[in-house]
Amino acid sequence: MKVSIVGAGPAGLYLAVLLKKADAGNEITVVERNAPDATFGWGVVFSEETLGALRDADYKTYVEITDSFARWSTVDIWYRGARIRSGGNRFSAIKRTHLLDILQRRCTELGVDLRFGTEVTEPDTGADLLVAADGANSLLRRADADSFGTTVSPQGCKYVWFGTDLVFDAFTFIFTETEHGLFQVHAYPFDERTSTFIVECPEPTWRRAGLDTMTERESIAFCERLFAEHLGRHRLLSNRSLWLSFPLVRNTNWHKGNLVLIGDAAHTAHFSIGSGTKLAMEDAIALANAFIRHPDDREAALVDYELERMPVVERFQQAAGDSAAYFGRVGGYTRLEPIQFAANLLTRSGRISHANLTQRDPDFARVLDAWFAGAATPGAIAPPPAFVPLEIGRTRTRNRVVRLASTVDDLVPEAASGAGLVLTGLVAVTPDGRVSPDEPTIDAPWAPVVDKVHAAGALAGLRLGHAGRRGATRPRAAGLDVPLAAGGWPLLAASALRYGPFGPVPRAMDAADLDRVRAAFAEAAERAAAAGFDALELDMADGYLLAGFLSPLTNRRTDEWGGSPGNRARYPLSVLDAVRAVWPDDRLLAVRLTVTDWARGGLTVADGVELARQVAGHGAQLVHVRAGQTVLGGRPEYRRGFLTTLSDRVRNEAGVPTLVAGHLTTLDEVDTIVAAGRADLCVLDLPSTELERTVLSP
């Protein structure tokens, strides 16, 4: 096979090695515009998981690469003048120019034709396989971007990639507050003389500091002064070190005809999780193996390559995106104590959990758990975070676990599960506020059930709401939002907009409706208190009545209850005020709140954070974070723990305790979320298993 590879970075060179090893008859040419020793950047990081793949793919380069590694197992986090150290992480790094030299020499040894200093003006039309390994700005890809479905967008903060002659002994994060805003550093050693030193900050901070107008030399001087405490007498080194925005590259197709994308030409992953070179070299392994499996069928090999790599890369890009977003808003976490700040940082991408931290560094996890439990004695032993009681106001839960009861009959069994708080499903304030005919109202005999919940050791919470335009539907077992065929009732909403395509059109509430429903909420709250409920959750989420006032997609009113964000929030807040006035001060008052509509033109996360501040200002002590379901045309981002990042933002930006769900199925997830300060309570959604039925069923 005649192979032409454009780009002599790690992806292109490693692919050349592997294809030549697989078949010495392959005629392979690598074309690179730069000189052999030209590179941008400093060190390259590898995790332990990557090394096994490199060992199996080409043992000779694996040995030389690993023999050149700088290795470390600790992460240092400098925050508020304190250093928090976490061990057991096992990272390795190598100088990028040395990695390229190893791969170049291996290519030459195997007979690969390397052509440096050669501009590619047009592709090699005689090649059986043409490989675009020419980076994020790939010329070959850009020549036919529509066919590849290419998107390139900025991600994360402004950043600059320096080197330094200070050799760190750990992967080091440094957070420094200035009058301009927060700056942070990612630094790590890669040989015996040098470390990588990446500085980043949000773009507004970058501009306020004047870095947008500084020269390269001035920028270095600014950063040396800013981090003088950590650099000491050492200096920062530049290799065309300019402030940049990270380009997030995505492609819906990775090949067309004989042209295939690899490495950064196919995808990028934000540097904050250190996976760019790892992904590129793993692409090379997958592509070479695909041709081993399909030596005579190029199309089958390329499809095989895509099917193997695309899902892996998508997961890494998701994790990298979460990490990049974290560093963009990290200034919002400065109220956290150092140990919790460190836990939040270490678990930011979702790839490391509390259990992983316990396995990697038992001492770090023990101290974190002890601090979280309020221990102040060295050597203290504490329960895992999920089992630490929570106090909000004068309400105390026995642990951080919440269970949802889908029916009245489920309340007592859920309480017996050991949860700290059990919440009902939606309880309508009036019969015409029900979702479906089988839904309970406040008229149900709740007191005996609440007594049984208390006897099981849990607190009982009632979710109080009005279905609005999502009412008069069949029970959920018959489908979601399926209108009743007969026997329905008139619906109310902020505006006369139907929810589903076949649902009835609600009536826009007039002044009398507004007063009547507000009074019904207050009366229902009084009755919930009389029944003995410990917590009341006022529903302003999921497209129901009060949520319908909050969103511009569903509130088209032109009176004092619509229009501006402040006016849209007025009626839900007036209902909250009415409920707060009658709800006992010694019991918990929560608001179930949509913090983003996940729909064009709807509520954004920033809007949701502001709404959380407002409901807290009106007496809500806890926000149950929800998202979507406002309109049918939304674009939800469902995955395990999909609400956790939203809860993190609400809790830390609005400064209000939160409850979060989002298909959390393990106690480890609860431990991770609450210990890292992303929420205070978690809905645990335990799946029924055969083992559980065998062992625990009566």
Image (cartoon, helix red, strand yellow):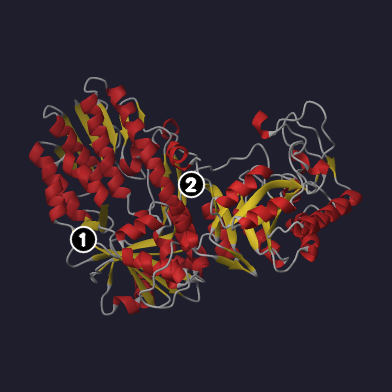
Q: Is residue 215 above or below residue 111?
A: below
**In the visual, does 416 lie left or right of 557?**
left
Judge from the rendering whether residue 18 lies leftward or rightward of residue 198; answer left or right: left
Q: Residue at x 70, y 68 (%)?
A: 586
Q: Nearer the viewer, residue 298 or 493?
A: 493
**Amino acid under label 2?**
Thr
Residue at (73%, 45%) from the top-left corner?
A: 544
Q: Where does residue 633 sit, x and y in percent of width and height?
A: 64, 37
Q: Quadrant of the N terminus?
A: top left
Across and down, in percent, residue 398 comes to: 55, 62
Residue 369 is situated, as x and y percent measured from the top left of the image, at 42, 66
- Counting from the top left corner in percent of width and height, residue 424 is at 67, 49
Residue at the farthest right position: 512
Which residue, given by chain and number where applicable, does mark 2 sit on? 665
* Residue 491 visible to an observer of this rendering: yes
Q: Residue at x 82, y 46 (%)?
A: 430
Q: Is residue 31 visible?
A: no
Q: Evaluate if marks 2 and 1 touch, with contact meaning CB atoms under 8 Å apart.
A: no
Q: Quadrant of residue 497?
A: top right
Mark 1 Cα shell of 10 Å, populated few (<14), some (14-19), many (≥20): many
Q: Amino acid at mark 1?
A: Arg
Q: Residues within 10 Å of mark 2 (few under 14, many from 20)?
A: some
Provide the residue designation for mark 1. 71
Q: CA distance from mark 2 to mark 1?
A: 35 Å
Which marked residue is nearer to the observer: mark 2 or mark 1?
2
Counting residues from the N terminus, which is met first, the one under dot 2 or under dot 1? 1
